[in-house]
Amino acid sequence: MSIPRALRTDLQEDGAGQSQRIETRTIRPLSGANGGSQGRIEFTLPKQGILDKNSYIKFKITGPNVTSRLPISAGAYSMIETATLRIAGTEIQTRRAFNHLTTLKQGYRTPHDRDNRQSKRVGCFTGTMVDGTLTTGTNKPGHWGVNTFSDWAYAAGADNREISTGYRLTNDVTTTPEWIIDLAVLFPILYSNNLPLGLLDNEINIILDLSEDLVKGQRSIEDGGVAWSAGTNIVNTECTLHVDLIFYDDNIGEVTVMERLADELNKGEQLVFTDDTYVNYNQPANGSGNILPVTNKISLGCDNQIVRSVLISTPRAIVYSDAAGSGNELLGQYFSSGSRIENSIQLTVNNNPVYPSPVVRDAEIWNELCQVMPTKYKINSAIYSHFSQVTTAGIDVAATQRLTDKTFLGAGKAYTSLQGNGHYYGINLSKPGHRNVVGAGTPIGRNPLLLELSDTQTAANPGAQGKTIHVWVTTERLMTIMGGKVMVSGS
């Protein structure tokens, strides 16, 4: 993300960096905050200093009982449906389906960061390791299981793995864990842009619209064979925003740094950043009892905009009539289910297909996903794809090919619940180098983007179930700050 010189806080040659001081303020939500199902939590940032990117939100979550667990791939991100950064009537950045998108993006983190740092901050974990324990049945050395070298999980017996006590939700606010979400994760514009709060005419608001708590896996799953029930909530009294504000000392007889910055902003400064256009689409269930190829043609809009990339998640559709049985045993609602037979993807841009023919093989689909960021998508191949792991008869997971027969969270919840459920899609439309400058993506003309996503449904569940297709199109935006006013437009 580009940073105008006027907003750089790390420069030393003019003495500004040497006169910096940072103050941390603790801000509580506005009155009326609701941490329950479909609730909202809102903060107002102080109109002082310069906002540092290391600010964060800290909160506690209680479950309906001591056996409640966060979905293991999403962790505390499962609580947030939409995050909005707003000033007056202008939305600077809005992240819709934030819980699904952030779970998807965990795969771009290094395994060390994801399974050590992120597990402690937000309680998410998908670490695997070769399991050398020799037991009966199909468990043999060389099969995979949960990484019990992390303190997030431990071996609770020869054939079961459990979440460590310190990472489990409880129904007691004094003992339930505390989680942290960085503001820059909620709003990527903050990764490298320090907003001059004290020089803006209006206060900036942070608005978090919380996810539903109507079916299993939207906020929590259960351990030990206990039936799922609603009641997983953010504790309002334990939810705080911690902001680091940068100030400069005023030296006598000198023009202050903030006065110089104000002069620059009065002339007008532009920040290049990206935002996501969000589209969701419902793929119907297969009620035919046969293998059924389905092609979803989805118009993504974004005409007359500059697009950097497309990311896609395809979890099974929520079944509201089956609240306790919906979702994945371990991942809740936060996964992307690949076909056990074949998937394909194609995108039409300006009436021209991106690929000569649809991308079909899972290895190629994964490779396209890796192009979206300047790093590979780091995920276990058995979690990403069903390739070489299913039987010809019945299209079921082959006993000798599965990750492991060991259970996780007890009660027969096999770690194979992860298998083939990290099958995300991505298409890169950025110019080489992944630079954050105006025009670094693909200009879209008058015709909208058209996505074609094919999925071969099997006759039995879970392959026969419908899917919710989440699509995020990353587009360029310009934020202009002039005389204390903030304006956001397409680039």
Image (cartoon, rainbow, N blue to C red):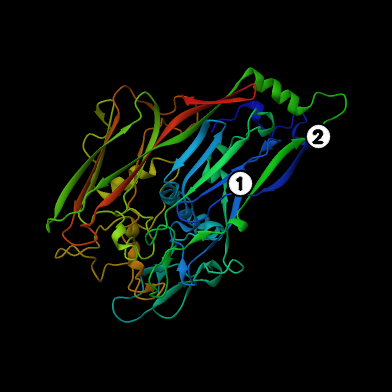
| Residue designated by label 2 | 249
Helix, strand or loop under label 1: loop
Kindly give the residue lying farthest to the right in the view shown: 252
Can residue 241 be spotted in the picture? yes
Query: Could you say where residue 76 lies in the image, as x and y percent from the top left?
Result: 50, 57
Does the image show residue 374? no
Q: Residues within 10 Å of mark 2 (few under 14, many from 20)?
A: few
The disc placed on residue 30 is: 1
Q: Earlier in the sequence, mark 2 or mark 1?
A: 1
Q: Is residue 312 left or right of residue 272?
A: left
Q: Is residue 297 above or below residue 268?
A: below
The amino acid pointed to by label 1 is: Leu
Answer left or right for 246 relative to 226.
Answer: right
Vertical position of residue 54 compared to residue 229: above or below: above
C-beta proximity under 8 Å, tags 2 and 1: no
The answer to which image quadrant residue 418 occupies is bottom left
- Compared with 8, 360 (above or below) is below
Image mark count:
2
Cα–Cα gap, marks 2 and 1: 31 Å
Residue drawn at point x = 45 percent, y = 55 percent: 37
Residue positioned 38% across, 78% down in the render = 159
Say which element carries label 2.
loop
Q: Quadrant of residue 331?
A: bottom left
Please name which of the two marks, 2 or 1, marks the residue nearer to the observer.
1
Q: What x and y, as percent, mark residue 405?
A: 32, 73
Q: How packed is label 1: few (under 14 Cα within 10 Å), some, or many (20 or more)?
A: few
Which amino acid type is marked by label 2?
Answer: Asp
Nearest to the observer: residue 131 or residue 274: 274
Q: Residue at x 43, y 80 (%)?
A: 157
Residue at image point 37% right, 23% down:
304
**Viewer-proximal residue among 297 and 10:** 297
